[in-house]
Image: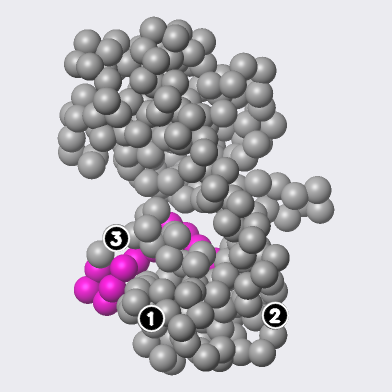
Amino acid sequence: MTDLPLSDILQKTALFSGLEPAALQAVQLAAHTCQSAAGSYFFLQGDPAERVFLLTRGRVKLTQMNPDGSQVLLRAVGPGTLFGAVALAQGELYPVSAESAEDSGGVYWGAASLQELVLRHPQMALNAMSLMAERVQEFQQRFRELATERVERRLARALLRLASQTGRKVAEGVLIDLPLTRQDLAEMTGTTLFTVSRILNQWETRGLVTLGRERVIVRFPHGLVAVAEDLLPPQTSQP
């Protein structure tokens, strides 16, 4: 993805899907380049939502700070993915922070210029509605998981989502290509650090994952799918 010209990346981006060449050119002309070093932020939770970003290089973690001061990893973003799309709604604040997990770069559009493009090209409005609907469905599903599913299923789904969002093929399997602590996973799945550690250790013994410092490799994705879909007997008893 990072070796492609920006025009090709735009064609593969859901917000711009189906646009005529002239419209895509207008979108590209309105874009501004940006860079963010590892550990720095494209924007912080609560900042005015003034820009929509498209990542072309690196990895970004979208996190949210809870009232108690704890930070929850909500989503991981890889090259070719839009983030900060809430800026399309006037007068909004960013509900999350966008932190670079590694040196990253991309392009952005100011909210006003992108809103003007949406008005000129109705296909973009339809695409934006589809994107928002997908995000709502994703978070509805995650809420349902937290409310109804055993922790093993929730953890398996979280790892599969992250592998899909930022996975990279390596010799041992699929590397979740961003720094990922067990505390991150505990917060994502609504459980404790102890429970996550115990389950991951069991899965490593069974050959489902390989663990390292802030590193997880999914060795047997079909095995995690079986856990996520409750096709295997539970291996732990703690909810």
Q: Badge 1 local density, few (<14 within 10 Å), some, or many (20+)?
A: some
First of labels 3, 2 by sequence position? 3
**Mark 2 to mark 1 CA distance (whole Å):** 20 Å
Locate residue 108: give its quadrant.
Answer: top left
Vertical arrangement, residue 210 with respect to residue 78, above or below: below
Give coordinates of residue 25: x percent, y percent: 24, 14
Q: Which residues are magenta?
A: 170-181
**Foreground residue, 167 or 128?**
128
Instruction: Quickly name the residue at label 1.
Output: 223
Vertical arrangement, residue 86 with respect to residue 147, above or below: above
**Foreground residue, 191 or 228?**
228
**Disc 1, SS:** helix
Image quarter hosting the N terminus: top left
Q: Amino acid at mark 2?
A: Pro
Q: Amino acid at mark 1?
A: Gly
Instruction: Quickly name the residue at label 3.
Output: 168
Contact between marks 2 and 1 (CB within 8 A): the answer is no
Instruction: Quickly name the residue at label 2.
Output: 239
**Disc 2, SS:** loop
Q: Look at the image and say whether residue 178 sits in the magenta stretch.
A: yes
Identified at 65% across, 80% down, the residue is 195
**Mark 3 to mark 2 CA distance (whole Å):** 31 Å
Give coordinates of residue 26: x percent, y percent: 29, 11
Identified at 40% across, 11% down, the residue is 117
Identified at 27% across, 77% down, the residue is 172
Q: Amino acid at mark 3?
A: Arg
**Mark 3 to mark 1 CA distance (whole Å):** 18 Å
